[in-house]
Amino acid sequence: MADNSTAYFYTTKHTEKTGIGAIIREHKGQGKKILRLAAGALRKTYKGALLGPMWALIKPSFTLFIMWFAFAVGLRGSGSVNGYPRFYFMLTGYIPWFYINEAIVQGARSIRQNSQYVTKLSFPMSNIMTFTNLASLIVNVGLTLIMYVILVIKGCCPSVYNLQFFFYCPMMFIFFWVLTWTTAPMAAFSKDFENLISSVMTGMFWLSGIVWDTASVKNEAIRISLYFNPINYFINGYRRTFLYGQPMIAEDNYIETIIMFAELFVLMLIGSHYYRKLRRLIPDVL
């Protein structure tokens, strides 16, 4: 039965005029609880493993090691991208991608995978998306530190431009957290939607600038269309911050930044609207 949670959502039906207002209210005073749940989500994922949550860093680090071995040892003639060895170019693309992929896929699954909070407890549903994305962000920060050490050894860092991380990382979290306001409720209604997202992400890996330089596209129409890919924006942002040593607003980057904020605003309107409409129905669906 979902009596308690259903009652919770219905009691707030007339107290919030907008979905954003509901989400803000649901997060008031919940900071410590969200942090505990994020840490708990990591422990739960690797429950029973000797190294526990450390596997969240070990698994992608092993992937990075294989990538280094392939390009630095096995494929010595693999060339460079923008004057940098391909391994370092791909390294600065993979690190944000690990988070983005987890944030989108696990964010969409968050409500369904944590249905006990919805059906058995009077728990603010929007907090589920928050602690799920926060758990992925914690891993991303750890991986970024590993990447930073590698780049320092390479001689690419430190640089004053490294401070741009404190813009790109929070904005990346906010963007893909807001995206879950739409995807998580819809995936709770249909597992097909969840499977669709997983399939789309496979394509997005190749359409984003993780393994190739999007700025090198000669067709102007295609190159401009890539500005509307937020994944591409944050991957290039990490490269400007840690590899290229370029300011956030450089050349055409200001256009990408404006587009990113415009997309974020649209996502907030759409996501908050659907969250407000669906949150009262989800307990019964689950």
Image (cartoon, helix red, strand yellow):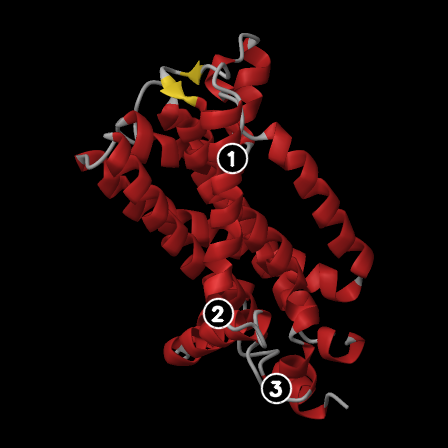
Whether residue 198 appears in this view of the structure is yes
Q: Residue at x 62, y 88 (%)?
A: 121
Q: Quadrant of the N terminus?
A: bottom right
First in sequence, mark 1 or 2: give its number.
Answer: 2
Residue where numbered disc 2 is placed:
51
Comparing labels 1 and 3, the label whose residue is closer to the camera: 1
At which x and y percent is residue 83? Answer: 36, 15
- At x 78%, y 80%, the residue is 284
Q: Any mark on residue 159, and which?
A: none
Rendered location of residue 239, percent (x, y): 37, 31
Q: Is residue 29 visible?
A: no
- Residue lying farthest to the top in this orientation: 218
Q: Position of residue 70 (x, y in %)?
A: 53, 30
Q: Amino acid at mark 1?
A: Met
Where disc 2 sits, the SS reads loop
Disc 2 crowd, CA 10 A, few/some/many (<14, 14-19, 20+): few
Query: Which numbered tag is attached to residue 8?
Result: 3
Which quarter of the figure has residue 202? Answer: top right
> Which of the labelled discs sits on residue 67, or is there none?
1
Q: Which circle's residue, 2 or 3, is located before the other in the chain?
A: 3
Name the spot of residue 269 as percent of width and height, x first: 55, 52
The mark that comes first in sequence, 1 or 3, is 3
